[in-house]
Amino acid sequence: MKSLLRTSTILLAMAPALVSALEIIAHRGASADAPENTLEAMELAWEQKSDAAELDLWQSKDGRLIVFHDNDTKRFETEKRKIKDLTLEEVRKLDVGSFKDPKFAGTRVPSLESILAIIPDSKREVLEIKDGPEIIPELVRVLKKSGVPKEKYCVISFNEATLRASKKALPDIPHYFLMGYKKDAKTGEFPELEPLITLAKEAGFEGLNLHSDWPITPEFTAKVKAAGLKLMVWTVDDAALAQKLVDSGVDAITTNKPAWLREQLKK
Ligand code: G3P
Ligand code: CA
């Protein structure tokens, strides 16, 4: 009886840890409720008790960092301009709020510094680099100057060369390789897990960040973990799918609706 009581006590004590072991990442901030990649979306992500918030990064024509998703301005103005052809000053003139809702009219592209400054204790920002390796020196400069502790951010990218360059410049920071799940245009084949694991291990990345279309099962996750890698998944706004991923043992789920998803997972 005594040992049964002790086991139950241990299990009860572990329960919150098991629940919180899943990292819920707000995709482009809490982007279902606020304009993506803005300070408002990041503030809302923290209000909604996200464990982390994701953002996208480009480098401007004059070498500065831009927190922005698309490679052009089409969604935000009638003229369509390549984001990399603009200076930071030009980017800062864009209204990145109205497309979401008139109540957000006049919202500006934030600086990375302003976002780093509001990361709560024990939370982290997920920095997705959309650009090529040439962005890394400026990113390192801004991160170092901000003085933000290394536990408060990690780096992700679809661009292998960029992620390798970033890992080399920031060896103590976790890096996760992003990969979609689309048939290769030449071979007609879907990507496979094993070569990705090999690549991540060889490059010294801490894990993979995969699109939710990947056939993720407990066995799939076990293979990633057996290699000593973390498994993150994007972008999931579907409660049943999120539960399936949790049951498969993924480490993190990126969602546009962090507060809603956490509620769904408690049910
Ligand atoms: O977190 C990964 C995810 O953001 C990648 O897709 O297009 O939303 O940047 P995208
Ligand atoms: Ca992103």
Image (cartoon, rainbow, N blue to C red):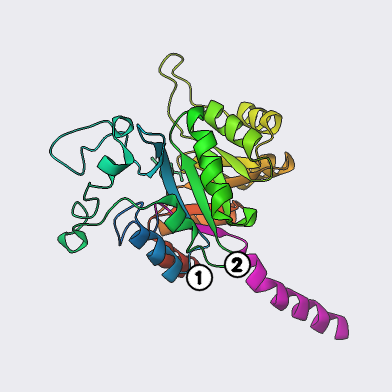
- Cα separation between marks 1 and 2: 9 Å
Residue drawn at x 14%, y 35% is 79
Neighbours of disc 1 within 10 Å: few (<14), some (14-19), many (20+): few
Whether the residues at callouts 1 and 2 have beta carbons within 8 Å, the answer is: yes
Nearest the eye: 159 or 210: 159
Could you tell me the amino acid type at mark 1?
Lys
Q: Which residues are magenta?
A: 1-28
Disc 1 is placed on an element classified as: helix
Residue drawn at x 80%, y 77% is 7
Say whether residue 96 is magenta: no
The reply, left or right, for residue 9 in relation to residue 205 is right
Relative height, residue 41 to residue 186 (above, below): below
Q: Which mark is residue 195?
A: none
Nearest the eye: 67 or 187: 67
In the image, residue 155 lies at what x, y percent?
Answer: 55, 43
Disc 2 is placed on an element classified as: helix
In the image, residue 95 lies at what x, y percent?
Answer: 21, 50
Residue drawn at x 20%, y 44% is 76
The reply, left or right, for residue 194 in relation to residue 160 is right
Residue ID for mark 2: 19
Q: Which mark is residue 266?
A: 1
Magenta highlight: main SS: helix
In the image, residue 247 lies at what x, y percent?
Answer: 58, 56
Does label 2 point to a residue whose CB lies under 8 Å from ligand 1?
no
